[in-house]
Image (spheres, rainbow, N blue to C red):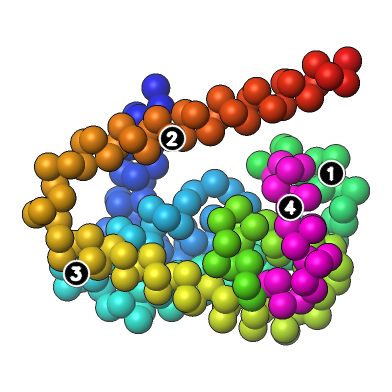
Amino acid sequence: MLVPIIEAVVTFVKTGISAAGYWGIAWMMAVESACIPLPSEIIMPFSGFLVHEGRFSLHMVAFAGALGNLAGSTAAYALGYYGGRPFLARYGRYILIREHELAVADRFFDRYGQSTVFFARMLPIVRTYISLPAGIARMRFAPFCLLTFLGSLPWCYLLTYAGVKLGENWESIRSYTHLLDWIVGAAILLLIIYWLARRFGKRAAVS
């Protein structure tokens, strides 16, 4: 069940980027930054693989990814700005924003302030949700946009470059890709089991 889902996501990303080019990269990265689970860890490395094949430019791919991050983050910022913390706490689960991820982003923003908007773009989980507390805190929009874009660039370059190196070494690792699919699938399955155990364990303790 899990492996077909992963394969469907990968196929969706590959098809979208192949068909829409840089705009496809920007759109998909915007979706991820709008708190919708479409991982940049698939989007950007595949784009880097196409850089290796000569279809894209490394710098343009990274720029498109960062621009998409900015667009999606702006939407999340507006949601926090106009909706506020009570709105997200009450309705966030209906738009795929979970309380735990939002709480983590809140703690980072409370501790490190506006600089978090820059550094959090390179951290897993937090990077996706940090725009929400920035909006709730009514951080000035211009610095938010600047720090979001600048913080997204290194992440996009890193993942794109990883895809380029993957392309360069594809022949040597191709025989192991099926094994890697199973390893990734098993890791995600274990994370899901862990998440369910924690959530239902807390509910049982409360009741």
Residue 21 visible (yes or no): no
Give SS at disc 2. helix
Q: Nearer the viewer, mark 3 or mark 4?
A: 4
Looking at the picture, does residue 21 appear above or below residue 5? Answer: below
Q: CA distance from mark 4 to mark 1?
A: 13 Å
Mark 1, residue position: 89
Residue at image coords 15%, 50%: 173
Mark 4, residue position: 104
**Residue 52: mark in rendering:** 3
Q: CA distance from mark 3 to mark 4?
A: 36 Å
Give SS at disc 1. helix
Q: Are marks 4 and 2 in contact (CB under 8 Å)?
A: no
In the rendered image, residue 105, in percent from the top left (x then y), is placed at 73, 57
Which image quarter holds the N terminus? top left
Q: Label 2 sits on what residue type?
A: Ala
Q: Residues within 10 Å of mark 3 (few under 14, many from 20)?
A: many
